[in-house]
């Protein structure tokens, strides 16, 4: 793949290293310093991958749509702009994959949590809760992953009162705990990211999935995972 990276922070550098190790070409890197050149830099790339800042997402989506380059959007914290981005993608017939978390493990964790939460539906004795922790430089709190987990718990338990506690400190790549607490006991489900490598692997998986697809529009990373899992299971 011939890739363009939007943002070159810690995640961007990990993605660049993984991409090059896998034999892909990182042909352009767009940062705040050369964002004005995006319209010139993006055409001709197979896919763009964005791990930048929330405020830049609408402009990056517009630049990719104008260049005809599919976008893997890994930035979080831009949900307030989602409606505007969806309109732009629809109007330009662009293609975009997004998700609150590109870790394959986290996306499987969503499914584990959904299955567990269904067991607690109607049990008022157990209160669901979420705790999440990330590095000090992460801007959005709660995380997009925590918001997704809260939505899952609300849907599956029928409870609206799902508190989320957020910690921003040090260099924590990301930890999410989902708990069900009662007077007599507590059940905890935990996902802990050991490094940023898992997020980069998921973003590159999404890039391979979206490259050359004819279905314009917004796709969630869960769509990618569903297709990949279905394909792998047919091979077993």
Image (cartoon, rainbow, N blue to C red):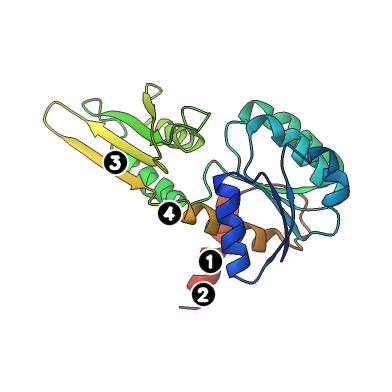
Instruction: Say which residue label 2 marks.
Output: 234
Q: Which residue is mark 3?
A: 119
Q: How many angstroms separate mark 1 from mark 2 (CA)?
A: 6 Å
How many other residues sit within 10 Å of disc 1, few (<14), some (14-19) or many (≥20)? few
Residue in the picture at 86% in, 54% down: 43
Residues under numbered marks 3 and 1 in contact, where contact means CB atoms less than 8 Å apart: no
Say which of 235 and 145 sits in front: 145
Left or right? Give the position of 58 relative to 173: right
The residue under the point 66% across, 63% down is: 208
Q: Can you say whether 193 is above or below 3 in the image?
A: above
Residue designated by label 4? 105
Per the model, the C-alpha gap separating discs 2 and 4 is 21 Å
Q: Residue furthest left?
A: 184
The one of 71 and 87 positioned closer to us in this rendering = 71
Residue 188 circle label: none
Mark 4 neighbour density, 10 Å: few (under 14) some (14–19) many (20 or more) = some
Disc nearer the start of the sequence (4/3): 4
State the quadrant of the C terminus: bottom left
Q: Quadrant of residue 152?
A: top left
Q: Are marks 1 and 2 in contact (CB under 8 Å)?
A: yes
Task: Please name the residue shown 11% across and 30% down the image.
Answer: 184
Disc 4 to disc 3, C-alpha distance: 22 Å
Judge depth for marks 4 and 3 and give the one in front.
Answer: 4
Q: Say what secondary structure mark 1 lies in.
A: helix
Q: Nearer the viewer, mark 1 or mark 4?
A: 4
Q: Is residue 220 left or right of 194 when viewed as pictured?
A: right
Q: State the residue position of label 1.
A: 230
Counting from the top left corner in percent of width and height, residue 144 is at 51, 35
CA–CA distance in space, label 1 to label 4: 16 Å
């Amino acid at each position: 793949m011939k890739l363009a990276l939007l943002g070159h922070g810690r995640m961007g550098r990990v993605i660049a290293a993984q991409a090059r190790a896998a034999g892909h070409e990182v042909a352009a890197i767009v940062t705040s310093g050369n964002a004005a050149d995006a319209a010139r830099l993006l055409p001709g790339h197979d896919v763009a991958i964005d791990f930048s800042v929330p405020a830049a997402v609408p402009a990056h989506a517009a630049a990719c749509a104008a260049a005809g380059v599919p976008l893997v959007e890994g930035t979080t914290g831009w949900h307030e702009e989602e409606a505007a981005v969806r309109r732009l993608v629809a109007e330009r017939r662009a293609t975009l994959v997004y998700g609150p978390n590109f870790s394959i493990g986290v996306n499987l964790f969503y499914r584990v949590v959904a299955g567990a939460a269904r067991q607690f539906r109607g049990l008022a004795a157990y209160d669901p809760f979420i705790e999440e922790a990330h590095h000090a430089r992460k801007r959005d709190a709660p995380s997009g992953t925590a918001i997704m987990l809260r939505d899952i718990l609300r849907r599956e338990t029928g409870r609206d009162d799902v508190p989320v506690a957020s910690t921003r400190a040090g260099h924590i790549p990301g930890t999410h705990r989902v708990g069900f607490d009662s007077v007599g006991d507590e059940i905890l489900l935990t996902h802990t990211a050991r490094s940023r490598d898992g997020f980069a692997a998921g973003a590159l998986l999404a890039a391979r999935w979206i490259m050359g697809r004819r279905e314009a529009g917004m796709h969630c990373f869960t769509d990618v995972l569903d297709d990949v899992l279905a394909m792998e299971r047919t091979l077993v």
